[in-house]
Amino acid sequence: MLSRTPLLKVARLFDATDTCDATEYCSTDFRIDDHDAGFVTLINDTVFTWDAIYQQGITRKPIPAAVAKTWLVEYEAGWQYACTSSTSNDWLTTTTGRTLPEDVERGILLKAAEFANGTSMGIESLRVGPLSVNYGSEAPDPVVSLLGPYRRVD
């Protein structure tokens, strides 16, 4: 599972972070299972070695989210705002269509307008010496409701 999404393309995949000693997998060795979640799966299970770190006790069980083997994945992820096309090595895709959701764009513009106007800086209270000021808002933040469906907790 890659951390940046939506996953557009995987350029290279290595089974170690040092490319000199690592095995590079061909594009036929892996597939993107879920672009939005960032899932990349090796097709041949015999190539993938699971190097989990195990907890020793009465029974031997793997420690959740603890892996001894590190991977190096060169990939492109994210949304594209405008219609662009590129054939250079800086961009892996040649998508010409817009992929940025309208909700995300609107949320960014609303938050930028708040910062520009100085209306909301995310400060709920301020204290300078004996003086204390609390800022309260009865209305929910519209940006939170716009971007809520796109939030990912790692």
Image (cartoon, grey):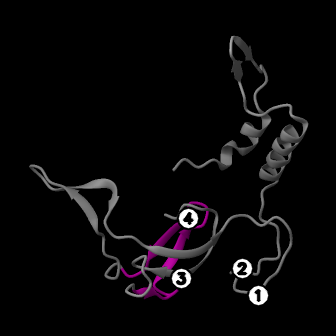
Do the residues bearing badges 1 and 4 touch, measured as CB atoms within 8 Å?
no
Element on which disc 3 rests: strand
**Left or right of 84 on screen, residue 41:** left
Element on which disc 2 rests: loop
Q: Give the residue type at disc 4.
A: Gly
Q: Quadrant of residue 20?
A: bottom left
Query: Mark 4 highlights which residue?
Result: 38
Q: Position of residue 135 (x, y in %)?
A: 76, 19
Indicate yes or no whether the magenta region holds residue 30.
Answer: yes
Query: Mark 2 highlights which residue?
Result: 91
Number of marks drawn: 4
C-alpha span from label 3 to label 1:
17 Å
Residue at image location 77% in from the left, 19% down from the top: 138
Q: Along the polypeptide, which appears first: circle 3 or circle 1?
A: 3
Q: Give the residue type at disc 2.
A: Trp
Q: Which region shows up in magenta?
A: 23-44
